[in-house]
Image: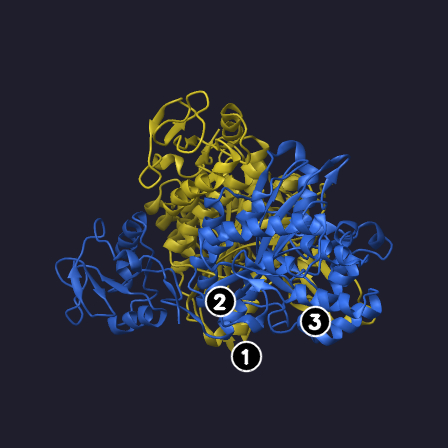
Chain colours: A yellow, B blue
Amino acid sequence: MPISGFPEWLPPQRIIEQQILDKIRSTFELYGYASLETRAVEPLDILLSKGETSKEVYLLHRLQEDENARRDDQLGLHFDLTVPFARFVTENHGKLQFPFKRYQIQKVWRGERPQEGRYREFLQADIDVVGRDTLPFHFDTEMPLVIGDVFRSLPIPDAVILVNNRKVCEGFYRGLGLEDTAQVLRTVDKLDKIGPEKVAAALVETAGATDAQAAACLALAGISAADGSFADRVRALGVSDPLLDEGLAELLQVVETAGEHAPGLVRAELKIARGLDYYTGTVYETQLKGYERFGSITSGGRYDNLASVGNTRFPGVGISIGVSRLLGLLFGQNALSVSRSVPTVVVVALPSEDRRAACDRIAAKLRRRGIATEVAPAAAKFGKQIQFADRRGIPFVWFPSEAGAASEAGETGETDTVKDIRSGEQVDADPETWQPPTVDLHPSVSAS
Amino acid sequence: MPISGFPEWLPPQRIIEQQILDKIRSTFELYGYASLETRAVEPLDILLSKGETSKEVYLLHRLQEDENARRDDQLGLHFDLTVPFARFVTENHGKLQFPFKRYQIQKVWRGERPQEGRYREFLQADIDVVGRDTLPFHFDTEMPLVIGDVFRSLPIPDAVILVNNRKVCEGFYRGLGLEDTAQVLRTVDKLDKIGPEKVAAALVETAGATDAQAAACLALAGISAADGSFADRVRALGVSDPLLDEGLAELLQVVETAGEHAPGLVRAELKIARGLDYYTGTVYETQLKGYERFGSITSGGRYDNLASVGNTRFPGVGISIGVSRLLGLLFGQNALSVSRSVPTVVVVALPSEDRRAACDRIAAKLRRRGIATEVAPAAAKFGKQIQFADRRGIPFVWFPSEAGAASEAGETGETDTVKDIRSGEQVDADPETWQPPTVDLHPSVSAS
């Protein structure tokens, strides 16, 4: 029985997922990010140090454990990859070189109520850079370049990375005269859910804003631009504050660096805040064009205070691709297809069971040259063996030469032949030299 | 804090693990196995259907769940990949093509007491073939070929796959006149732990054997051969039984097919039984030469009765590589090393912070051609930037031409240059055409 919130892909979908993961990984590596995996579990106090998601944690208990033991051994499954990474860095900082760039592609678990695009088990692909004591700002500008390159390498709709900077919001609110900037941020973050009227009312009620201050907050949240013009529009609101200036300069740097790398990749979107508490500057989200209603498929930002050991801080910046969410969305729309459901390029036809050893030798020669090969499972009629390949989308069937076997329907002759079962073309072939077209070496994934 | 039994690798170890996983995966695919991943959790009744490991299961509870809810929602983490695969096949059999060959590389969890080579969280790499109603025996002969090819592709000691067949043991015990063959098998399986005298005594005590019968069981268990001679030695013990004959014929086929593929790869070892209940014929283990004391690093076998839907059975055969166990063992012996701890091939030196955009462009050109590149994190002295590369084992440092920047210590000139910091050799280079030696494109792993 399927379990709600724990998606499983069928073999063709899994091939698509794997090729997408390969592209993600190779792009991450091109930027120098090193692979890391952390254990699936963390002590509960580590997981709860980031308060908001406490109710979503899955705890582990051994089946035979008695009730008393439970209190000592409170392990839970990680719900993201940032908290475990911060723990890993503080635990191993003496063995790492800083700035430390790592990527991490792993499942995470949340005990949330499942809904479209929300799973209880899902795959994330994260990059983060962490420095010791300080981390130069230019790493904040690198995140969108990496994500942009990842998405450009995939057969999916265009992505737009939405960027904001918490310093802009906090500085603006402070400059306006609002003290509880965290409360204002949390309230404005509900804009898409509850609309501007309710946000304005909530700002007045819970953050002590006047109507004019609430209107100014909404005006800031309404600013959105694919170039540096957002800064002028913010300044035109007439608020000044040193933190606001710092945030605008940072955000401008992100937008301009991304604009040079790939025009249209990034948009300054001043309403995004990301709910989590630990971000201190830049924040990122990503929308797929035409799929905006599905919400963000990346999330990330700068966190200056997540990890420390004694007096040493490890500030970081990172971004996470919601791989399961992206795939669930695209699979749900039948937006991706794959040329076959198995890695196999060639099926070696089996004239009779007593020739299996000879057919295994042909297969071994092809495999040694990197060509994925199966020998037919049984010495059925060749028509049935071709059907075996056809049903799986395997492009080629290999017919061994007659030596030692009766010819059937003229399919076998003096030399081996190989047939492209899509075109029907059949040619003489030697397993030591025959090469399939490069495009057929692996299943190919495309937008459908 | 590290948690006992939940290993985490440092970045250089993780690169080694990843390259080993890449080799495993590509070998699996060369034989036509398709990738599959199943969810990490299974309902408790599925996990407990394979009785022996019930005490090792980790159960999941949501942190905010009340006590009453716990009984309905008994999910546990999977402790192997075979039970989830069998469940997946019965759930999706209408959407799969049989025989279905799949590989699965995932973490599994067991609440065991941790000890050397035994973890609570570990990575397995499994292949299985499952048929509908029947599964030809030749798939039993394929398992050692795949595993042999995997191990030959890795920089590790030679592996010997030990093979037995439960039909040989059960037929032999039955032919001897012993009825409770399962009890005999379980007792003989303790041979390496408790020695022959105690096994003989236990056979007399718990399986109703005479001293002569016990001695015959031990004589069978003592047979070991790298070729077909084991069959003659079994027959020389003078026991006859149809199941014994069937088992000997099957085991002979495995040994001979493997012997043709790779001499010395397989050894018939008539004492191995594998503790788990579900194997019905062939069983496999693997020892690394020189590391025999660490125990088996693969396990597997034929299971004819693990999965069924109504009257339809799905017999299978498979083998599992204990990746974490293998790596833990080799890391513990410092038996593997890697040329660098990051994917980066080139560091672009930064003459001054205002030239970062120009350096980013050089990096983008190199990345576009598949060369992993980082720009130096800060415009420090070039000596320090070279040290940045050297500490990480990055082989090349790129020096941008002077245009727009002051030359420092003669390192920058009219054109870009690239320096191999291992040899000190420095040459003119164009980011659109320069190519590092192929061997430097990725970190290289070797036996150390």
Which residue is rendered at x = 51% and y = 28% of the image?
Answer: A385
Spatial CA distance of label 2 from label 3 is 37 Å
For disc 1, the marked residue is A310
Residues at circles 2 and 1 in contact by the CB criterion of under 8 Å:
no
For disc 3, the marked residue is B113
Kind of residue sitting beneath label 1 = Gly
Q: Secondary structure at mark 3?
A: loop
Examine the image and state in which quarter residue B191 appears: bottom right
Residue furthest top as drawn: A409
Q: Secondary structure at mark 1?
A: loop
Between B54 and B146, the one nearer to me in the picture: B146
Q: Is A36 left or right of A206, judged from the image as shown?
A: left
Kind of residue sitting beneath label 3 = Arg
Of all chains, the one bearing label 3 is: B
Q: Are marks 2 and 1 on the same chain?
A: yes
Of all chains, the one bearing label 2 is: A
Compared with residue A302, is residue A201 higher up or lower down, i.e. above or below? above
For the question of whether residue A34 can be seen, the reply is yes
For disc 2, the marked residue is A315
Spatial CA distance of label 2 from label 1 is 14 Å
Q: Nearer the viewer, mark 3 or mark 1?
A: 3
Kind of residue sitting beneath label 2 = Pro
For residue A302, the mark is none
- Number of numbered tags placed on the structure image: 3
Residue furthest right as drawn: B68
* Quadrant where the N terminus of chain A is found in the figure: top right
Q: Position of residue B371 (x, y in %)?
A: 31, 53
Between B233 and B47, the one nearer to me in the picture: B233
